Image (cartoon, helix red, strand yellow):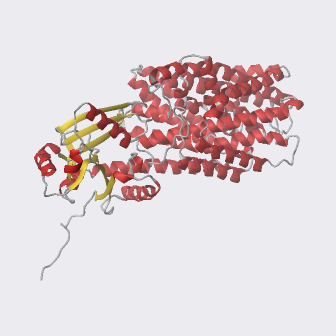
């Protein structure tokens, strides 16, 4: 039923096209607010530079957004879902090192999520200062951004319904405003010839600065791919035709205005508002502010989804994830909401004006583009595309994106350092969490569980041992059903022997697909030791307690298991026995035997553990039915200790 609803949503339809406008294109759709302002605010307007810049914008939107993302990357859908972590899940078996570009892409996308609300809302609100130079822009921007982050906890399903129509108004407005201004200087159509773009980049003395500013026109392309699961690739592709047309018309209209002001210093004037009729400016500011809020909301929601995927894929600490409304896929991650808000306030506080923020914008998302290109090359290999086409794809887009990176690198000293620090902090957190898990896994020891069948059966019937629980449940990381961690065997047999009527082993396997809910039951010792393997998609909530209960209920209904308590009184009245989850928290007793590199990772991991959810909360277990046991992973041996008995 759910798959039918999802496929219906992904079919080409008017509602799907409207959803695309409201969710997918918010970020890229607000770029006309600041692209040309970033290029021309610091110098005298030059006609050749105007035409060259428009040509650069047109061909960037064509090559980077239309060809790479809309036509090629959207084909890399993981059961209808997109985004860099979905793409990584498709190709991760090709090479282990692909986790690095995946983490870089995810971290820089989150850093972009911090600056998007700041720059888009600031650019929109600054239009109010056109007629009122003393207008308090920063307090209003802070108020709007604060309210935006505050409403996240309540869900945005009601607001989401009007996103599409509002963004249709936005795109129609910017397209019409630009269209009606083009006839003031029709020579802007020369920009359709890529010759002018190439000439500008070759001969203009500040070409790198221009490249960095031009890149801002395509910064929302990654969000276009990330949000594919909301409405499907066909709706995105068709709606992009309308979106690109309105963007190009607006850029060309701004270009016409700039040509008319050749030789002038425009300073704080924004060409975006300058092409509007005077009577319309106030309405234009209002529409722009609404569009900026929608673009910011889409980026925040995308960040929540990204983190939920990262948690499932074990590249982010387990954090609280809430579902504030019944709308499918809508999440609220309190910790990320706070991190994004602090980052956003930091950017507003440091840069004050959108013109200063433009210097910091684009550098982080540029790295996301490069990471996506790396993963896409491996995806095309997986799809058995001819190596010549893959090589051509790689040459074109690595060249293009590294040229953009060179342009964006100029921004480092002008504010790009802040987004790099934010992105590096996020990368460090993701990589440390991932690497620490790998280090811990090297210390995990497994044994053949079959040789313990007799003793487990005897222990279950040994009345000399007090009953620990009727149903005793362990979470196991052993992929092989015939193996078990030595720590679990130690917990059952040695660390206060645990007698139970039935022992359960629960294993969770996170699948490479976004949505899956499957399980397999293996009776290792019929009626005594049972293993359940859950196969969950990386976007599925891991409510293990509820999922386990559902499986047991089905097994009882099918007569596969009897969970009646074995205590005489309870057994007489057919009362089910109690369930107890034993969670083993694996800790390092010492890190001195690790290399300096691994030691740093494990020390940082310890810090992150303090801020992450406990194991029982992370797996959705009811803490009243959980016994937590701390077990050492690397027990120090006594070989090097010298003692003399006297």
Residue at image point 49% right, 44% down: 321
| Residue 105 visible in the snapshot | no
Q: Is residue 111 above or below residue 495?
A: above
Front position in the image: 534 or 419: 534
Q: Is residue 486 above or below residue 528?
A: below
Q: Is residue 243 left or right of residue 526?
A: right
Rendered residue at 28%/56% (across/down): 633
**Rendering coords of residue 342 (x, y %):** 62, 52
Q: Does 477 appear above or below 390?
A: below
What is the residue that sits farthest to the bottom in this orientation?
646
- Quarter of the picture holding the C terminus: bottom left
Q: Position of residue 415 (x, y in %)?
A: 66, 49
Q: Please name whichever residue, 34 or 465, is drawn nearer the observer in this view of the structure.
A: 465
Which residue is at a point 49% across and 20% down the rendered structure image? Answer: 7
Comparing 399 with 239, the one in front is 239
Res 144 → quadrant: top right
How far across and how far down the image is residue 1, in percent?
A: 44, 22
């Amino acid at each position: 039923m759910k798959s039918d609803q999802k496929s219906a949503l992904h079919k080409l339809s008017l509602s799907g096209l409207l959803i695309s406008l409201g969710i997918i294109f918010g970020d890229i759709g607000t770029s006309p607010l600041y692209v040309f302002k970033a290029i021309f605010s610091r110098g005298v307007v030059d006609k050749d530079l105007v035409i060259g810049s428009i040509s650069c914008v047109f061909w960037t939107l064509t090559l980077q957004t239309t060809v790479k993302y809309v036509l090629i990357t959207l084909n890399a859908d993981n059961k209808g879902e997109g985004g860099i972590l979905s793409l990584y899940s498709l190709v991760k078996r090709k090479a282990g090192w692909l986790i690095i570009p995946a983490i870089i892409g995810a971290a820089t996308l989150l850093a972009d999520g911090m600056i998007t609300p700041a720059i888009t809302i600031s650019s929109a609100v600054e239009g109010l200062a056109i007629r009122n130079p003393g207008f308090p822009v920063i307090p209003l921007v802070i108020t709007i951004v604060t309210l935006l982050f505050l409403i996240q906890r309540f869900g945005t399903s009601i607001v989401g319904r009007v996103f599409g129509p509002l963004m249709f108004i936005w795109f129609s407005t910017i397209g019409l405003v630009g269209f009606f201004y083009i006839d003031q200087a029709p020579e802007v159509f020369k920009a359709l010839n890529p010759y002018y773009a190439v000439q500008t980049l070759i001969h203009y003395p500040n070409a790198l600065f221009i490249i960095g500013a031009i890149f801002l026109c395509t910064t929302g392309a990654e969000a276009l791919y990330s949000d594919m699961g909301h409405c499907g690739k066909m709706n995105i592709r068709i709606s992009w035709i309308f979106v690109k047309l309105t963007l190009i018309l607006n850029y060309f209209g701004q270009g016409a205005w700039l040509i008319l002001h050749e030789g002038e210093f425009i300073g704080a004037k924004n060409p975006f508002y300058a092409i509007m009729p005077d009577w319309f400016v106030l309405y234009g500011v209002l529409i722009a502010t609404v569009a900026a809020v929608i673009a910011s909301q889409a980026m925040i929601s995308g960040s929540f989804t990204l983190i939920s995927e990262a948690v499932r894929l074990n590249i982010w600490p387990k954090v609280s994830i809430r579902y504030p409304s019944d709308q499918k896929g809508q999440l609220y991650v309190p910790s990320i909401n706070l991190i994004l808000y602090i980052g956003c306030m930091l950017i507003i506080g440091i840069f004050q004006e959108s013109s200063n923020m433009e210097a910091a914008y684009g550098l982080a998302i540029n790295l996301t583009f490069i990471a996506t290109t790396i993963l896409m090359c491996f995806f095309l290999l997986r799809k058995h595309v001819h190596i010549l086409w893959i090589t051509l794809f790689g040459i074109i887009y690595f060249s293009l994106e590294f040229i953009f990176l060179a342009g964006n690198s100029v921004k480092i000293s002008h504010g790009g350092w802040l987004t790099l620090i934010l992105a590096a902090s996020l990368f460090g957190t993701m990589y440390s969490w991932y690497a620490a898990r790998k280090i811990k896994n090297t210390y995990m020891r497994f044994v053949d569980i079959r040789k313990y069948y007799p003793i487990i059966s005897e222990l279950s019937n040994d009345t000399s041992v007090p009953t620990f629980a009727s149903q005793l449940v362990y979470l196991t990381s052993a992929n092989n059903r015939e193996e078990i961690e030595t720590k679990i065997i130690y917990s059952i047999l040695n660390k206060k022997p645990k007698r139970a009527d039935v022992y359960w082993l629960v294993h969770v396997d996170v699948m490479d697909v976004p949505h899956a809910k499957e399980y397999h039951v293996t009776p290792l010792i019929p009626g005594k030791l049972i293993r359940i393997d859950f196969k969950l998609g990386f976007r599925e909530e891991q409510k293990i307690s509820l999922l386990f209960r559902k499986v047991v209920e089905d097994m009882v209904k099918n007569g596969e298991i009897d969970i009646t308590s074995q205590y005489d009184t309870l057994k007489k009245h057919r009362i089910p026995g109690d369930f107890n989850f034993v969670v083993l928290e694996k800790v390092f007793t010492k890190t001195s035997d690790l290399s300096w590199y691994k030691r740093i990772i494990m020390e940082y991991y310890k810090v992150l553990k303090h801020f992450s959810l406990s194991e029982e909360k992370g797996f959705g277990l009811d803490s009243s039915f959980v016994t937590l046991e701390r077990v050492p992973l690397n027990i120090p041996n006594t070989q090097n200790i010298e003692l003399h008995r006297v």
